[in-house]
Amino acid sequence: MKGNRIVENGQRRLTIVSYVVTIVFLVLGLLPLVWLFITSIMDNNSIDSFTPKFVPKVPHSISITLDYSGMDNNDPQFYEKDAMKATWFPWMAHMKENIGEITVTGVKDGHELYRAKTIAAQFYVGQPFIVPTQIFKDSIMAQRLPQIEDRKLSEFTWYGQGDAVSISGGSNITDEPLSQQLAYFFDKRDILDGKLVVLQQSHNWWRLFDSYLSLNYLALQSAGSFGFYQYFINSFIVCIGVIAWQLVLGGMGSYAMSQLVANKKIRFSLLMYFLATIMIPGVSILIPQYLFMQKLGLLDSLWAIMLPHFAWGFVMFLFKGFFDQLPKELLQAARVDGASEFSTFIRIVIPMSIPVFTIVAVLTFIPVWNDFLWPYVVTKSQHSWTFTVALNDLQNSKNPRPNWISAGGVISMIPLLLVFIGTQGAIEKGINFSGIKG
Amino acid sequence: MKQRGGFYKSIAAIVVAVLLVALTACGSGNKNNSEASGSPSSSSSPKASESESASESPSEEPIVEITAWDLQPADSPIKALKDAQFEEFARRYPNIKVTHIDASQTNGREKFLTAVAGGEGPDISEPAFPDMQVYIQKGIAADITDFVNSSPEKDRFIEGSFNLASKDGRIYGIPDYMYTTGLIYNKKLFQNAGVANPPATWDEFATVAQTLQEKNPGTVGFDILGMDWADWHFEYYVWQAGGDLTELQPDGTVKLTFTSDAAVKALQYYKDLKWKYKVTQKNVVQDYPDNQKDFYTGHSAMILGGSDTAAFTGNGMDPNDIGFAPFPVGPAGVAPSQVGGAFYMVNAKSSPEKQKAAFTYAMFFMSKEQQEYFYQFHKDNGLGVNPLAIVKDIDMSQYVTDVPADFLAGVLKSAENPQLEYYLKSSLSSYVVKPIQKVLLDPNSDPLTELQKAQELAQKEVIDKYNEDVLSGVAQ
Amino acid sequence: MENQRELQLFETNQKRSRSRKKIRWTPILFLLPSIIVFFVFKYYPIFDAIYISLFNYDIINPPGRFVGFGNYEEFLGSETFWIAMKNTFIFLILSMAIVFWVPIVQALFLSNIRRFNGMYRVLYQIPSVLPIVAGVLLWKWMYNPDRGLFNYLLGKIGLGPYGWLNDLHMTKLAIVLPGFFASGGVGMLLYYAAIKSISSEIFEAAKIDGCGPWRRIGMIILPNITFVILIQFIGFMSGVLLSFDNIFVMTQGGPADASLVVALMIQKTAFVQSRFGISAALSFFMFIVIVILTVIQFRLQREEE
């Protein structure tokens, strides 16, 4: 066949059309994803603007030097407060300006006193409660300082008497509109204790990806230090739990149905018993399942999300189809050897069933990972949300930051992508196995 | 063969073990965290933690545990305030242990009902005015008449504030806070367009909005609310046209007046704003936070809202640019301002000891000291202060010094003419929203027809049953 | 030889012991967890749903007033329900027109490409990997009539501006459209495998008969994968009838019930309106519909076998 290079009449045209069609579909399919990624690194003002912008703007990087020469105070807290004032207040006042990070260096008598750094990821997470208004007072920052420290929303390193620093004379303020505005802001508001000596503006490419980091800082009340990523972890735990059950106990059940039950009638009824449930739509049993979970007191836990997924007729069907094809002699030989059914299952059947196990795992993972309605209905407090519920909530929250939603979306794709690519071969094999294609 | 079997067995065992550990960790972790009452990890004061003080001070009374759904989410600007209050309460009342839960997500109301039904509703909650009526009728609100009457704080509340939480002489809630609503406008955009004053009538409103749009290209005159609680704003227009959406009858039953003259006029006005005057945003199905975003990004000139502007100033808007005015009057020549607010409600299904503890908890927040602390915090942090206090003994003038004078004047003026939201709003909202959306999206729709349809549906599905229950005395 | 005889002996022994009606615990143990789980999470709830549907279910004081078929009468007579049914049907038609045939076409043409075929197959999977919730939010932005990408781009070529989710007539289309871009995935692989499994002899015969490549698609490939298409279609129908996630996140059934489907109505009547009896009745109704569809699917599969 391969050597036969006789090209038919319409073949060339067909091939060209095939390529065109495929490319077009692929591009159409991937375009929204590209847009998703782009918006995840754009700053929010660009996203919200009324004419869509396509190119993400690199955020500005501001570095400020404050001089405290001649001051008596040696309390690090005092200087930290000043650094925070120099960071959070001007940033809030210029929230629309796509600032990526602000670094403040304090100097005293020619030596470095401290260094503070805050990046956009931290700022946008903290802004709603650290600087919710345009009122900038020393007393306010004094109150906020503990919150900034607790949530690690700014880095502050105290040197005391660090490296020597020399500040050149003349104007040390970058000649850019933003820098000029900031300098004017400091001058007009006069809230700092130190004297502004240097204000420089530059770019930092890494700050484009801050929306992903923001997800980390979005700490929940009772989540670990993972922030938003906790939700992905929840989804993951739920998936693993369901897969574990399906593989082990579902597998055992199907195996029994296939190999261990002799009576044909019983086998058939069991099969029907499991398969009939495929016809029960999830939405039909939503309410009873919810009320049942309530009675069990499991509402608002990951168990509640997981348990209903333990009963999937389709999985039993797939398993049975596969187990039916197992060579009976092998099993009989094991029995003759005196092995118990259980160890036969473990030692012989499982190793042979890797293909079907992989397929079931993948086919289970995807819908459970994407599951929205059930976790939405059954969870109450944030710590038991899966990421689907969290993403939906992000669009409703008081401070919807579009690029967080995009970043969340991009991250949510990664596990699925990995699973898909990793098991591509197994999936195709499984399709051949199940005979769905007729 | 044998080795592989053993290998898989151990894998399975490990997976199961890991799962169990992870789940119990999650489970107990969750429990631990939600029981960290009053002493969250962040911003914990140097004071002794609540559990220590409980063992320090000798308590003769038995310990009562209650739950409250008032834990602030991590990014709330008043989190520090609330946490401090929680700690103070724990210090003063060591025998009452409060578990705080965060229920701030958007479908909180749905979750509340089902939680109560399942017996895990909070002992104390803060339902809004309209919800209160429904809860009393459903038997969820505890009868706290005796608690209130024997409380020394009773007379501190302003006249009539208990009315909405009372029924047949019994009291079911403690007034929590009150706000009024009005027209919020962007002074800068007004200046640009040369408009000196906010509009005072419906006609003026339409023409002013058009002028604003012309003179400020790229902006929208008015952000109309067409999604979610569209009826919340719509009801004002019905009032301005001289009527209301429902009428409470003397015998306790409810009569629907969706098809009244006033409602039809109001809906027609809505339709005109969108299709005739063309002064609304194109995306009428966006929800209220998106409308607010339009406003604080300077994209729209007017919006309806409450007297609290934190949503705008917190997103970069200069408070001096925000103006507040009473609603423009409608054909009936009136423009009542909606009075909204919330009550503290004790769970009727809780035990008597828990109810008493919950009552004490609520009264704590309403005490003069805590109220002053509350307002002082808002003032110190530049968060908008609601100039209307629900207790008599607080001088609000010291707290509103940072609010621009004309804004304050606007709020006080609108508070002169208060009106409560239409009766049974909670249950009827979804029925009213439909004609509103229809009219905003379909230029060929007829307001009267749509309202008729909505009224028939609501009558059949909600009112008939409600009235039956009322007349047969099913007050639970 | 020896082994075989031993085996036969063993089997007869087994059979004898079975006929002595000895209870074999092992299968029972193996099956028990699954049986219990299926009962608790599938059978019990559906019976419970039927039970609830007979009452004016009061969640505070269950079960409330008994109304028998009252709930069924009520929703069958309710305009909202028929709107939801109509919408569900329209969604079905739209999905068929816009989404269903895409994987088939993709597979058809992909089977003609020899170079880097594997890579294309993988690339086709990627769009289907985006979780529905994330994808829908993305599309919602793009549909924004004030700021969205679509009106902007269409405006550049002189079309629009369209209302999309703000237009009562466009809403359903807007909800179905993302499916066009993101379909494919495993479905496409299925069709591809089916096409590839058509024996090459048939193709050779057709070639010799003078059937050109284009005609081959119509005359050979399509007829041979008709069965797969049919089976997929039934599954597709069930999926569309029950679709919830994408509609909920995008429009919540609005505006003005333009995108209200029965699945959404079930959630709304229960969790927003607290009318649990009606919700259960609707649930049971959907169950019956799906049962009918699935039985048809099974019958067809049986026939082919």
Image (cartoon, coloured by chain):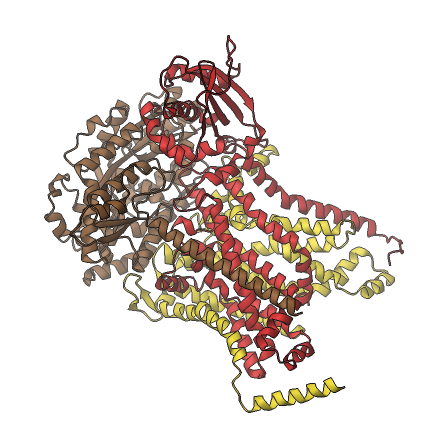
Identity of the residue furthest to the front in this view: A161
The quadrant where residue A268 appears: bottom right
Q: Residue at x 55, y 67 (%)?
A: A248
- x and y percentages locating residue B179 in the rendered image: 25, 37
Q: Nearer the viewer, residue C188 or B247?
A: C188
How many marks are shown on the rendered structure?
0
In the picture shown, does residue A337 fall above or below C180?
Answer: below
Q: Residue at x 50, y 60 (%)?
A: B17
Q: Nearer the viewer, residue C255 or C1?
A: C1
The N terminus of chain C, quarter of image: bottom right
In the picture shown, does residue B36 fall above or below B397?
Answer: below
- Whether residue B199 is visible here, answered yes or no, is no
In the picture shown, does residue A244 fall above or below B245?
Answer: below
Q: Nearer the viewer, residue B61 or B395?
A: B61
Q: Nearer the viewer, residue A315 or A327?
A: A327
Relative to A170, is A72 on the left or the right? left
- x and y percentages locating residue B110 in the rendered image: 35, 53
Label the brown chain with its letter. B
The C terminus of chain C, quarter of image: bottom right
- Identify the colour of chain C in the image: yellow
- x and y percentages locating residue B444 in the rendered image: 44, 44
Label the red chain with its letter. A
- Whether residue A175 is visible here, answered yes or no, is yes
Q: Residue at x 53, y 16 (%)?
A: A176
